[in-house]
Image (tube, rainbow, N blue to C red):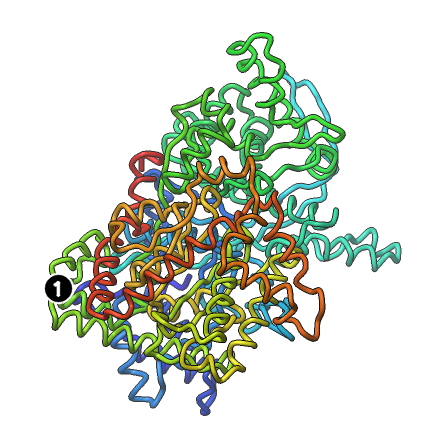
Amino acid sequence: MSSESAPIRQGNCEPCESLAANFERHIRNWLSRDEKVPGDLYYALALSVKEQLFEHWRSTRRQDLSYQKKQVAYLSLEFLMGRALGNMLLCLDLTDECRQSLNQLAIDLEEIQEQEHDAGLGNGGLGRLAACFMDSCATMDIAATGYGIRYEYGMFMQRIADGYQQEMPDKWLRMGNPWEVRVNSHNVNVPFYGRTETYLDKKRHIAWVDTQDVLAVAYDMPIPGYRNQRVNTLRLWKAEATDDFDLSEFNQGDYAEAVARKNLAEQITMVLYPNDASENGKELRLRQQYFLSSASLQDLLKNWVNAFGEDFSRFAEYNVMQLNDTHPSIAVPELMRLLVDVHGLEWDEAWDITTSCMAYTNHTLLPEALERWPVRMLGNILPRILEIIYEINARYLDKVAQLWPGDHHKLRTLSIIEEGHEQYVRMAYLAIVGSFSVNGVAGLHTELLKQGLFKDFYQLWPEKFNNRTNGVTPRRWLAMCNPGLSELITQKIGDQWVTDLPQLSQLRQFADDVAFVKQWAAIKRQNKARLARLIKRETGVEFDNSMLFDVQVKRIHEYKRQLLNILHVIHLYDRICRGDTDGMVPRCVLIGGKAAPGYAMAKQIIKLANNVAHMVNSDKNMAPWLRMVFLPNYNVSAMEKIAPGTDLSEQISTAGKEASGTGNMKFMMNGALTIGTLDGANIEMLEEVGEENFFLFGLTAAEVAEQRKDYRPNEIINNSAALSGVMQLLESGHFNLLEPGIFDHIIGAIRDPYDQWMTAADFDAYCSAQQAVAAAYQQPAHWYRMSILNTAASGRFSSDVTIAGYRDEIWRA
């Protein structure tokens, strides 16, 4: 970072060089161009904005490395950052100045912002949550560093061809990344493969030898707090070969092998989460997880040794590592390796440190999503780590045996090593054993973990378990993405809500104010018009702003039940075809999201959505009543337009399956009404806004479990005129006339008595709730009153509130 860079704007203090002057200097000296190329203008503007925060970025790092505060390391394989420019301008209070300066040069800020490529280093909610948490930590003056991977290719670009998802590479770094700084002084070596040796030198030592090391290169991105002096760091690791070539191989003429080794090293950070269906994919994913964990922990220990030498007695007092889901749980044995093998601590001392500074967040209720690695694979790739895991397990099972003497079933149930035809390491178990805190991400989710998935661990360590309901940053998800609504709110209650979102509760007093409701409605119409332009550009389909905008955007998964939504669209289609439009409200349905490349059923659901949309949009009789699109390549930037323009938010997962959800919170914050089940954070949203302002339907988690014992979907279908009509259309091939049989798997899944998503069971209740939606939308004053009350009740779902809980209850920071 340049020592000549300008300080951040603070209050009325002007930076040494204005943003406008900075921008013109970059255009003149760096780009050396006369023509105004939008991509180059973006790059110059980004560099200019980054220079505005250099001084405080440096001072933040200096302060944190002196350990004046407890240091939080947030380890996550995903950081779904999206675009940075708009958020940077907002946090630095430079948006208006930037727009005015660009206008003088006949440049439109929005056009420049569109040039930035989304930093899609995450698959969905997990990665976006990490981004929100980083924003909140900086805004709340918490000394936090995010550690992740600098993937060359982010989340794939989704294209729709003949209704099918096609994955295209997302080379987000093609034009470079103006926000990052390469920091070679923090590079570390990460070992793989090799073998272990034992030797005596006053005491027993184990050395990991003959390793194939990979260089972890640090790239830092600034994370500014909202109009304060803190600029935290997101450190992303890139894998590079330790030497460009192995000279001995090169000199022997084996050029191809030398290059292959280099490629194998750099492959680690090439692509976000490879498809691990193959053995090679599994190995690569394991190598990614260890690479992240080892590089990050080495970095933390290096900082400590620079400040305090080899005295680790107070390390846990000043450091905490939050494991974002199971992916970085290999950090537990890696910290033990570094402390014992590298820094010479005794096992018990190292274990006390490890279990005093590791904290684990669980994000899933699906057992199949809890990672487990084959022992043979882990032993081949990370032999020393496997030895440490066995040692951890043996010592821990000794304690289990003392608590449950003679209970071999309990030992097998709680063991980190899963026995069977092939042995596996249960990574979630490893995270629980090695952590002092285990938290779920919504009230129901945490209770289900304690009662189900981790019941035995809860019996063993009830004090470890706690809940931290997720939240989203109000800076990006209201102040930045919805400037019209943000300005109206500020006019009424002041601007403190941006960093204290519960202040939005003051809006309740205006819910019956006719003039305020009128302004609220006008802003919603403007946001719908903006969203309609996006949809028209991406799909060619026109959405009528006067119609209800009914939206479901999230990863495509059976438990999230996009299928239930599509079945309802077919039901509406069927009604319109029969002339049954009594009480119907004109509706535009938007579905968006990506399916994992190897998830065949999710891809079929996308195909069905597109085929149904085609039939709806090509029938002129539908036009006054129904429009439908599947929006391709849903991402953070798209959501910034979708959330403000949505009337109805679809949060319809099978109860007991969604850990939390965060899209639901973004919609609520922007005044959308929710139709949803009692699942995830929906429950807490319902508590805050009241059942009269929420369209609730469906089985509860307990009812789902009970009905699953004797589930009869065919009987449900036969007893439902609406669902029978939908199934008749589906099974007749109406939506796949030229592609017979392509939806047979979907039809079979709906009728399957073992369908764990219970699609048929909730259909009639869902349709009834949708009728209540239609009735409410036909009363605009009532609808907008509910909308205002939803925004007013969203304060609990700020990531600032969530992070305050982590800070006070887990990190003690």
Q: Position of residue 230 (x, y in %)?
A: 30, 54
Q: Which residue is located at x 11 percent, y 67 percent? A: 513
The quarter of the picture where residue 88 lies is bottom left
Secondary element under disc 1, as helix, strand or loop, is loop
Q: Is residue 156 visible?
A: no
Residue 309 lies in what quarter of the image?
top left
Quarter containing the N terminus: bottom left
Residue 753 appears left or right of 657? right
Image quarter in which the C terminus is found: top left
Who is closer to the viewer here, 283 or 255? 283
Point out residue 501 in the picture as x, y percentages from the top left corner.
23, 54
Q: Which residue is mark 1?
A: 512
Give me the residue at 36% from left, 40% from top.
468
Quick one: 215 or 162, which is closer to the camera? 162
Kind of residue sitting beneath label 1: Asp
**Residue 106 in the image, given as x and y percentages of width and height:** 34, 90
Above or below 192: residue 238: below
In the image, farthest residue toward the right: 252
Give me the residue at 27% from left, 64% from top: 776
Residue visible at 72% across and 33% down in the picture? 379
Q: Nearer the viewer, residue 455 or 63?
A: 455
